[in-house]
Image (spheres, helix red, strand yellow):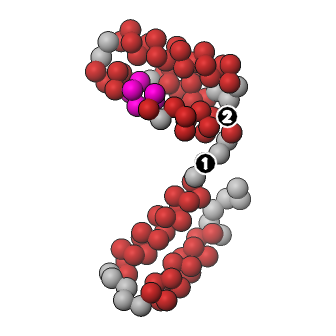
Amino acid sequence: KERLRLLLAEHEPHLIRRRLYDFYDAAARADMEETTRLATTIDTWWPAVLVALTEDVTNARTEGFNRIIKQTKRVGCGFTNMDNYRRRIMTHIALTRGQRPAA
């Protein structure tokens, strides 16, 4: 776990490679099902993780809007008028925008 934390804290490509090697090495030495599964998951998602570490890019804004839309749909209990549904979503987005820190 700590090796993964060190890996995710890095931003320089050469240090990321070193930390990734250390993480895989520690996971292999632990010889536990959980660490093997974690290492496999990191390996599967590595291209996306690498972009997140080096480019400082995130999809948090999209996920936030998606959460607002799902919550509005849940509260609406089956909107039948699509225009009203769309207005309600845009209103919720406009209202919550002031609560978020500037990106």
- Which residues are drawn in magenta? 38-43
Examine the image and state in which quarter residue 16 appears: top right
Crowd around label 1: few <14 · some 14–19 · many ≥20 (10 Å)? few
Residue visible at 51% across and 31% down in the picture: 46
Horizontal and vertical percent for residue 7? 56, 24
Q: Quadrant of residue 98?
A: bottom right
Mark 2 to mark 1 CA distance (whole Å): 11 Å
Instruction: Tell me the residue at 62%/66% (across/down).
Output: 99
Q: As drawn, which residue projects farthest toward the top?
A: 29
**Above/below status of 29 relative to 52:** above
Element on which disc 1 rests: loop
Residue at (49% x, 64% y) in the render: 66
Residue linked to disc 2: 54
Looking at the picture, tell me which residue is in the foreground, 17 or 64: 17
Q: Which mark is residue 58?
A: 1
In which quarter of the view is residue 73 placed?
bottom left
Residue 65 spot, x, y in % from top left: 53, 65
Q: Is residue 67 left or right of residue 37?
A: right
The residue sitting at 40% across, 16% down in the picture is 27
